[in-house]
Image (cartoon, rainbow, N blue to C red):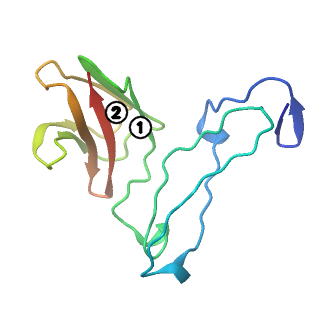
Amino acid sequence: MVTVDGNASSNEFVPETAADWDTINMDISSLAGEEVMLKFEAFNDNGSSIYLDNIRVYEGGPESVESVMAMEFTMFPNPAKDMVSLIFNQPLDENSHISVLSLQGTCLRTVLLKKGERKYSMGLPDIAAGVYLMEIKSSSGRDVRKLIIK
């Protein structure tokens, strides 16, 4: 039995749109300078799975970090083989660059996305199997995600 917005349902809940997610901010500034471990624990009485995404830790709070893009996007498939696609929740409000980086920070490929674009697919046939970083950068900030290539 799953309860969403006070309504009970026997169907398993699976988030499908941005509106299905909650943003929760926790002030742990009293722990500054301490070693901190975060633990996520779910109690569901054999109900739905737990979904966690985009967990970010900020010093000074998320509003003080200008380097993180507000643009939300989906990257798939991940792991990828020959191609990876990005779909943005809304059209880009400025030109942006997409880069594939090695874990050492070496740029393997960069592509310019023009203002107004909403989706992009990048071929990966010449990039060896492994773990990489997909960086999206504009003048308003950047976002980095892990990309696995099979």
Which of 146/136 is in front?
Answer: 146
Kind of residue indicated by mark 1: Pro
Reading the chain from its start, which is encountered first: label 2 or label 1? 1
Image quarter for residue 140? bottom left
Q: Position of residue 107 (x, y in %)?
A: 11, 43
Disc 2 designates what residue? 117
Tell me if 26 is positioned left or right of 85 in this view: right
Q: Position of residue 113 (x, y in %)?
A: 25, 37
Kind of residue indicated by mark 2: Glu
Disc 1 designates what residue? 91
Which of 69/43 is in front?
Answer: 43
Tell me if 115 is positioned left or right of 5 in this view: left
Instruction: Report, in whole angstroms, how far the alpha carbon at label 2 lies from the one at label 1.
Output: 5 Å
Task: Provide the secondary structure element on which disc 1 rests.
Answer: loop
Image quarter for residue 69? bottom left
Check residue 3 in the rendering and tell me which mark sits there, or answer none.
Answer: none
Neighbours of disc 2 within 10 Å: few (<14), some (14-19), many (20+): some
Tell me if 60 is positioned left or right of 133 in this view: right
Neighbours of disc 1 within 10 Å: few (<14), some (14-19), many (20+): some
Quadrant of the image for the N terminus? top right
Task: Provide the secondary structure element on which disc 2 rests.
Answer: loop
- Asked whether disc 2 touches disc 1, contact meaning CB atoms under 8 Å apart, the reply is yes
Tell me if 65 is positioned left or right of 9 in this view: left
Q: How many labels sit on residues?
A: 2
